[in-house]
Image (tube, rainbow, N blue to C red):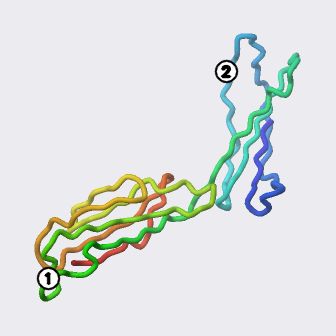
Amino acid sequence: YATMYEFITDPENATLAYTGSFPNIDLDNPLGGEQTVVFDPFTFTMQGVYSLELNIPLALDKIPANNLMKVGIGCDDTKPTSTHTLNPATPNGLNGWYVSDLTVTLDANDGTENWQSGVKEIDYKVNGVQKTISGGHGSFKVEDDGENIAVEYWAVDKVGNAESPHHTFSV
């Protein structure tokens, strides 16, 4: 049988969220057997930590405690957030122009809860050309020259949640 517990609403005492049984599983082969277990559909209604416990007892098992397997499941539907800093922080030339290289540093996070998947990447565009920084921190130089250079960026976490709306600014 299998049971799934939800640890979100009461972290100390899990709430039973799902239970199911699997008939006719034969793993009595002494060299080890293999069987595919198919679950009924389950909808994670809240993000957070779940625990799936599988217990497949064998009829003649002398060590029944080795039949229990627990798997933690994190459900993350929170979008990551990101910020930017410029170096130099303000234009260092006349009339709002940068006369030295402009470095944009991007930082992103996906929260501090243990069920959040973490930042996979930060995507950015400079004048429509898209590039990617792996992880939650990185820098790039604005190498385009001209007026009103458009910069857009957003973070993506490890389960595909993309920050929205995207951040935009121009230099």
The answer to whether residue 11 is above or below residue 5 is: below
**How far apart, in angstroms, are the residues tagged by discs 1 and 2?**
70 Å
Callout 2 secondary element: loop
Query: Farthest residue in the bottom direction?
Result: 95
Give the residue type that dot 2 points to.
Glu
Name the residue tied to disc 1.
Answer: 93
The numbered dot on residue 107 is none
- Which image quarter is the C terminus in? bottom left
Query: Residue 55 at what x, y percent from top left?
Result: 80, 33
Crowding at label 2, few (<14), some or many (≥20) Cα neighbours within 10 Å? few
- Which image quarter is the N terminus in? top right
Query: Residue 44 at what x, y percent from top left?
Result: 66, 56
The answer to whether residue 101 is above or below residue 69 is: below
Crowding at label 1, few (<14), some or many (≥20) Cα neighbours within 10 Å? few
Give the mark nearest the N terminus, 1 or 2. 2
Q: Which residue occupies 88% across, 16% down?
A: 60
Q: Quadrant of residue 33?
A: top right
Q: Nearer the viewer, residue 25 or 145?
A: 145
Callout 1 secondary element: loop
The answer to whether residue 88 is above or below residue 124 is: below
Query: Residue 45 at what x, y percent from top left?
Result: 68, 60
The answer to whether residue 134 is above or below residue 99 is: above
Q: Quadrant of residue 104?
A: bottom left
Q: Which residue occupies 55% across, 54% down?
A: 117
- Report if the CB atoms under discs 1 and 2 are less than 8 Å apart: no
On the rendered structure, is 111 left or right of 98?
A: right
Name the residue tied to disc 2.
Answer: 34
Query: Residue 6 at what x, y percent from top left?
Result: 75, 54
Give the residue type that dot 1 points to.
Gly
Q: Which residue occupies 37% across, 52% down?
A: 134
Q: Nearer the viewer, residue 58 or 133?
A: 133
On the rendered structure, is 111 left or right of 99?
A: right
